[in-house]
Image: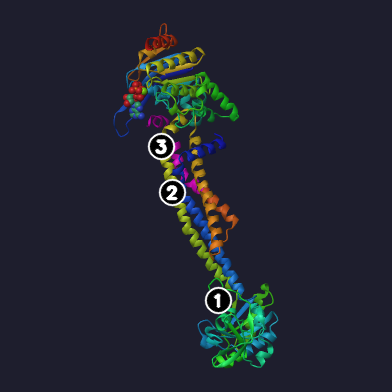
Amino acid sequence: MSLVVMESLRRYYGTGNGGVTVKALDGIDLEIHPGEFVAIMGASGSGKTTLMNIMGCLDLPTEGKYYLEGIDVTTLDPDRIAEIRNSKIGFVFQSFNLLPRTTALENVELPLLYRRGSQSTRALRDQAKEALSRVGLADRMDHVPSQLSGGQQQRVAIARALVNRPSLILADEPTGNLDTEMSLEIMTLFQELHRGGITIVMVTHEPDIARFAQRKVVVRDGKILQDGPIPDPARAEEVLVRFREEHTL
Amino acid sequence: MKPTVLVKLSFRSIFRNRMRSLLTTLGIIIGVSSVIIMVAIGEGSQAQIRDTINSMGSNLLIVMPPRGRFDANRLTQKDAERIRTEATLVSAVSGTLRRSVTVVGGSGNWSTIVYGVEPDYQAIKQWELQEGEFISEQDVKGRRKIAVIGSTVAKNLFGGVTGVGETLRIGNAPFQVVGLLKSRGTNSMGQDLDDVVLVPLTTALVRLSRNNYLSTIEISAISEDKMTEAQAEVEGILRDSHRLADDKENDFEILNQSQIIEVASSTARILTILLACIAGVSLVVGGIGIMNIMLVSVTERTREIGVRLAVGARRKDILLQFLTESIVLSLLGGAIGILFSLGVVAGLGKFSPIRAIVNPLFILVSAGFAGSVGVFFGYYPARKASGLNPIEALRTE
Ligand SMILES: Nc1ncnc2c1ncn2[C@@H]1O[C@H](COP(=O)(O)OP(=O)(O)OP(=O)(O)O)[C@@H](O)[C@H]1O
Ligand SMILES: [Mg+2]
């Protein structure tokens, strides 16, 4: 079964008082299968973020259908949609969006606090620790964001996205605020997670980052311009090793 | 989200901005403590009024000339005598004559109040003697020139001495002091209860009155629950004694101690309620302060709210988070206010003559009230927080 199915999806922004309507998405047909690693590309203002917001159930389409794991999201009530965000989706943002003055561990625990059904505090904590070790930050659990590098903060954010074992990880320009080395680290992590069976959809401007994905979708003016597999994706791990060799004395 | 987690979150956020939280709760602290202190003082003064009136005598009925018409006074010794012999619900009766007089004694002059009284007066007013004896039946019958004095008079006339056995002058007549009353101090209205001279009623009528009319007739009913009946009985006897026709109004007035207490303490109660309301206004102002800070907090934490919504918080979760925070904040303020007011009340008791009584139930009520202030004034900001659009919230700086 497909994980994501979008059928002639439209998202219009009305300026309200008689102005022009912006067609941020103008008829998107898209299907994503479990286990894919998709890069979404396109010029600024083409509608990538709008697409991600709808895919992540933060926003609803003006028209068209969106099925997530076969469920028609457009018909659900807000609480149910919140539950889907909690259990099926993990977000990674360009600007990390960690809670300030809150430790890495507590940031990762956040989605668990909103999980329906009760579980012991202890079990939740263990789960958060596991997610942090998965992104290689087991030794930084008690650090607050201001004590972490950008790459580390983004890894904490990825651990937060992973902690509820979602079906889909959505990353909107996850490397946009990171330097090359940190970006490569994040892509290494993404590829690792992808090999582990996790579905990832990532928006990026940089072709260098997109080449680590398996499939490339190009958006223009709210429509899909191009959609196809990336032949022979690069291995971020190897690129990272090479990069470090070139940049150390 | 679990309630324990909500409370934990609230405490964290409150203690993260310690100074701000303290200043915010200051309004609640002041509001709660002023309500408690005002009510405590009000209840204290009510109790004080009750005590004062009770100290006037036991189960007291006072017969007086009609209010505002002292010239219409027709109370006589005969009236007192008839009540004494005919009334069945009465245990003691004394006519009195009250005059402000300057008395002259061993070491000086003293302006005081001289009461002409009968022997029963001691029981009615529950006077105890420090030394000597009270006015007797023979003293009244023989119109003896003797006096029983209060300790203030003794101090001012006779210096360090008790005065018993000495002589004092009222007008030109010498009176021998036969007794010294035990000191009673001042009552809540600042009246010195020991500033009295008691003489036999008959002597006083001769020496201090132009006619034979009494100032009052003071009566003790046999028990507290027979006060009203005793009053009716006395009224009947006096109407008969004054030969009033059925359609005539009373030419006297009877004050009933329990009614006086009722009237006086209801005045105090109204005053208490008024004070508490004024203090309550500051509680409302405190609530507005909390609302203000919660609104600021919602704005500051817009991004946090966006993150929470993105990871699966329902609107309800956000609403409860902020509502819990404002409730915890007001309850903390309430608790500090309660402790503070208890301190003030204890201090008043120790270092001032003001009496304040804290009703434990009222503490619970004010804690509950502080909590409701938190709910009431926290709801709007919490509502605002939970209504944020997650996409926009995540975009704010
Ligand atoms: N809330 C909004 N109200 C009105 N118009 C909006 C709103 N959000 C986005 N748009 C418009 O929708 C279009 C698509 O925006 P979107 O953010 O999806 O672009 P994007 O591809 O993510 O761009 P970028 O690469 O710069 O992030 C833009 O023209 C934008 O101006
Ligand atoms: Mg964008």
Q: Main secondary structure of the magenta part?
A: helix
| Mark linked to residue B300 | 3
Q: Are marks 1 and 3 on the same chain?
A: yes
Q: Earlier in the sequence, mark 3 or mark 2?
A: 2
Quick one: quadrant of the N terminus of chain B? top right
The answer to which image quadrant residue A173 occupies is top left
Few, some or many C-alpha atoms within 10 Å of disc 2 (few <14, some 14-19, many ≥20)? many
**Mark 2, secondary structure of its residue:** helix
Residue B390: image location, x then y, percent: 42, 31
> Magenta residues, as a range?
B372-397
Host chain of mark 1: B
Q: CA distance from mark 3 to mark 2?
A: 18 Å
* Amino acid bearing label 3: Glu
Asked if residue B224 is positioned above or below residue B367 in the image, the reply reads: below
Q: Residue at x 44, y 36 (%)?
A: B387
* Amino acid bearing label 2: Ile
Label 2 sits on residue: B288
Residue toward you, A142 or B262: A142
Residue toward you, B226 or B347: B347
* Amino acid bearing label 1: Asp
Q: Earlier in the sequence, mark 1 or mark 3?
A: 1
Q: Is residue A34 visible?
A: no
Q: Magenta stretch containing residue B389, yes or no?
A: yes
**Mark 3, secondary structure of its residue:** helix
| Mark linked to residue B192 | 1
Residue B228: image location, x then y, percent: 64, 75
Host chain of mark 2: B
Few, some or many C-alpha atoms within 10 Å of disc 1 (few <14, some 14-19, many ≥20)? some
